Amino acid sequence: MKKQLRYAVQGAVGLLALGAAAVQAQTIQSVEIEGTVTDFYSHYYYNQVPVELENAVSFKFVVEQDTSVLPFYVYSGSSYEYQQFQENLYNISYTFYDAAGAEITAPATLDLELTAEELLETYVYAERGVTNDYKYMQWWGRKTTNETNDWNSLSGYITNNGMAPFFAEFTPYPLLLSATSPVNQQFNGWLESYGYGEEDYYYLSFYGTVTSILATELDADGDGFADSADSCPASLMDETVMFDGWLNSGVTNYVDASGCAIMDHYAACAVAEAEEPTSPWGWFQPVYSGPTYCEKQVVYQLQDEGVIDYTEGRMLRNALSLSYSSDGRRR
Ligand SMILES: [Ca+2]
Ligand SMILES: [Ca+2]
């Protein structure tokens, strides 16, 4: 419940920013690279590739990155351009599949997913040739689990030495082209997991051939509008418009062309009201217990925009009034 309230306020703040220049703090993109596994190696002479992964024939590497960050280091020379970013990865994971396409369960001590909460340090490296076609991009992240010198890192490295298009954009942030059948792209994955006192240490790498690259921007509230194109990136996504958390208007909680749901519009009114200066009369101010001007305007605005029809407008007005009435619980 508390979480939902926080989202409501975020959504409403996004809505209030409408009309002003859209400034997006973060643009989170998910990059999903799939391919076939050619060779697995263990870099510890005393430890082998875990038997489960010996059966891996394909892989999926997924990384979530903030593409709105500024580079940490840039080099632009006569033969190549290089960019380095840090602290902009939120999730790195590997999934491996056997010949039948079934997901392989890795040994418990081999960490194949590092989440936003766990990642302690991340880097992204990208380079493209100016006078040749050599290009690469690498994602790297590590976590520590406790104070006992644990080390868990995951890295993915994709290269293209051929002529196939690779980057959709290189600056300000390198964006890979999505492709279902990339040509001549190699992948090199690194998986490192060890913990003090653990018997199984892993320092593995594998080579693979890329079969698909899918880059999609995250849509946190799942309304079909990518975060950067969503004026309310944390919409209240109830199926029907609810007032005061309990009164169901029966009207579908439509999302408008800016990515804001009807409930976001009402939530924005609540935020606007809360931000109004306190009355000079203090507690003597008469308490008006009806819909606010802002709330009343929501229906007209939505009807003007064609989001709702007249009947739905009436249903919203009735439900809103009822939520304020003596039958309602709003106080
Ligand atoms: Ca969205
Ligand atoms: Ca939204």
Image (spheres, rainbow, N blue to C red):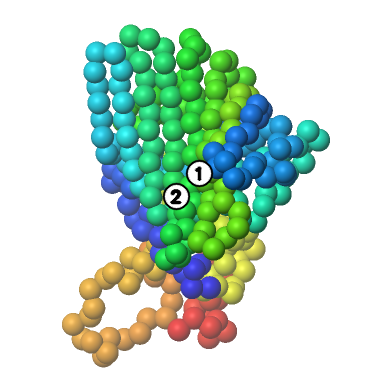
Taking depth in this image into account, of 279 and 72 the one nearest to the observer is 72
Q: Quarter-wise, where is residue 16 in the image?
A: bottom left
Image height of 331 relative to 137, above or below: below
As drawn, the residue found furthest toward the left would be 280
Q: Residue at x 49, y 68 (%)?
A: 3
Q: Which mark is residue 142?
A: 2
Tags 1 and 2 touching, CB below 8 Å: yes
Mark 1 residue type? Leu
Image spot of residue 270 (x, y percent): 39, 68
Residue 39 appears in which quarter of the rendering? top right
Q: Which mark is residue 154?
A: 1
Residue positioned 53% across, 83% down in the render: 329
How many dots with numbers?
2
Q: Amino acid at mark 2?
A: Arg
- N-terminal label among 1 and 2: 2
Decide: few, some or many residues near mark 2? Use Cα within 10 Å; few <14, some 14-19, many ≥20: many
Residue 215, numbered circle: none
Q: CA distance from mark 1 to mark 2?
A: 6 Å
- Seen from the viewer's position, the closer of residues 177 and 299 is 177
Q: Residues within 10 Å of mark 1 (few under 14, many from 20)?
A: many
Q: Residue furthest right?
A: 100
